[in-house]
Image: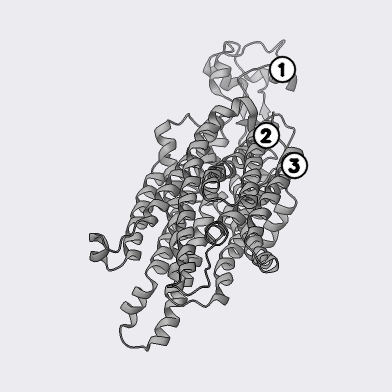
Amino acid sequence: MTLSKDVVYPDPSTTTPSTQPSLDGMDFSSSSLEQMEGVFHIVEPPRRSTGRLLMHGMAMFGREFCYAVEAAFVTPVLLSVGLPKSLYSLVWLISPILGFLLQPVVGSASDHCQSRWGRRRPYILGLGIMMVLGMTLYLNGDTVITAVFRNNIDSSEKRTWAIVITMLGVVAFDFAADFIDGPIKAYLFDVCSHKDKERGLHYHALLTGLGGALGYLTGAIDWGPTFLGRMMGSEFQVIFFFSATVFLLFLAVHLCSIPETPLKDEMSETKLLLKHEVFNAYGSTDTTQKNIIEQKEPRIRTISYVQGEEEEEDDTKARKRMTLKSLIQALLTMPSHYRYLCVSHLIGWTAFLSNMLFFTDYMGQIVYHGNPYAPHNSTAYLIYERGVEVGCWGMCINAISSALYSYLQKALLPYIGLKGLYFTGYLLFGLGTGFIGLFPNVYSTLALCSLFGVMSSTLYTVPFNLISEYHREEDEAQLDGKMTDVHRGKGIDCAALTSMVQLAQIIVGGGLGFLVSLAGSVVVVVISASTVSLIGCCFVAIFVRYVE
């Protein structure tokens, strides 16, 4: 929406009587402008169909499918290439550290991308290609080294190169898969109205759950004896074929889902002046209007640039000079309600990842009483493997319940609101993990895995719904002239929220190993997850702000 700062009225003596209406009694003060309903309003994007929103969410389906495959196969792959145990923590910490440091940079860069294809889709495409490249390396590392060097190096050197390539693939995949979530959410916010954003986020959570469930089921199948396994050479190649095909197909559908307005065109549209048809309705002809109101070009007031052209130019220069240091400063100085939301997201993901990353190991050691350090042909180790296998089915239950709950959220939202959904997700997860830690039983544990899906769906939808509410509130405040110094874009806000996932991974990777060593049992993992989640209940109820 654009307001003209400079309106010039022509001298009555220079206007012919036949075309000049009487200006007596016409008040162009701010009070009269406020009475002109329909002149000043926020123009939202057109309503999107359910099909378009489902197409937009397909990227989340593909991403979660690949995530599930990684969770099922990355440890066997790393073991198969001979990665030393001392390097395990390095593999899991490199990607989140890079993500936490660079996520805001990517978010800010996408806010100001000048591509004719739009602001978000170039980054989504680039990160998607990096995900496929990472999968190629970590699922085919040994094969790649064999194809490149053939028999020109000895076995020890080949093993070293295979470890390097596989580690590089894991880090590249995690880096891109974590990063891509921010631009996808910002893309949804850019092209959808407020109601469609809520619908789109629910579809994202639904498809995320379905993608994870299908990925875990695909990983649970023994592909070695099948026709595809024999044709492609190994189980890992079959899994790579399915993962790459599913992800690239759904990524293409996502990129073609909703057209994105290039930044230059969007800035031009915001410079349109008062709605033309409203003044026509006042009773004047087009010729009369042109004689009465002559609009100047230089200084224009818009929702995005309410300070005028000079401040617009200063803001553009500042964005071009934006560095990592200035971005971190912007994050630290963000409004308190954004900061509290980021902290609550960090608490939630810390609790969730604490449980999810160690859950299969918990099933094998505590629920089934197996021993991962026993000889591989011993009964204790086989029992542990059986527990890990059942734990994978628990993860599948989690993914399916996440998909179902994302649909149920839409029905619950009018009754309990975002605050109720946020609180319920943390509470159920905290209680569920607490009972699993206190009463380790196979059937009760699998049943309580459904509560993990409630937390997963909550983390993927409610915080981003709140971001959307904050943005809408800021737009309305700018329209009313109550807020003028908002220079953050949707991309950097989504990136700041998503970077909390990487920070949670760093905390979990660096802290839980020490806790397990200190306690001597992985039971401390689920108890810690339960405690952190229940603390999060109090935080989201007291500190997070909800827009009425």
Amino acid type, residue under disc 1 in the picture: Ser
Residue 299, visible in the rendered structure: no
Q: Are marks 1 and 3 in contact (CB under 8 Å)?
A: no
Q: Which residue is mark 2?
A: 419
Q: Secondary structure at mark 3?
A: helix
CA distance separating discs 1 and 3 = 47 Å
With 343 as the anchor, is 354 left or right in this view? left
Q: Is residue 76 above or below residue 421?
A: below
Q: Is residue 262 above or below residue 198?
A: below
Q: Earlier in the sequence, mark 3 or mark 2?
A: 2
CA distance separating discs 3 and 2 = 12 Å
Amino acid type, residue under disc 2 in the picture: Lys
CA distance separating discs 1 and 2 = 39 Å
Amino acid type, residue under disc 3 in the picture: Cys
Q: Position of residue 467 (x, y in %)?
A: 63, 40
Q: Which residue is mark 3?
A: 538
Q: Is residue 411 above or below residue 84?
A: above
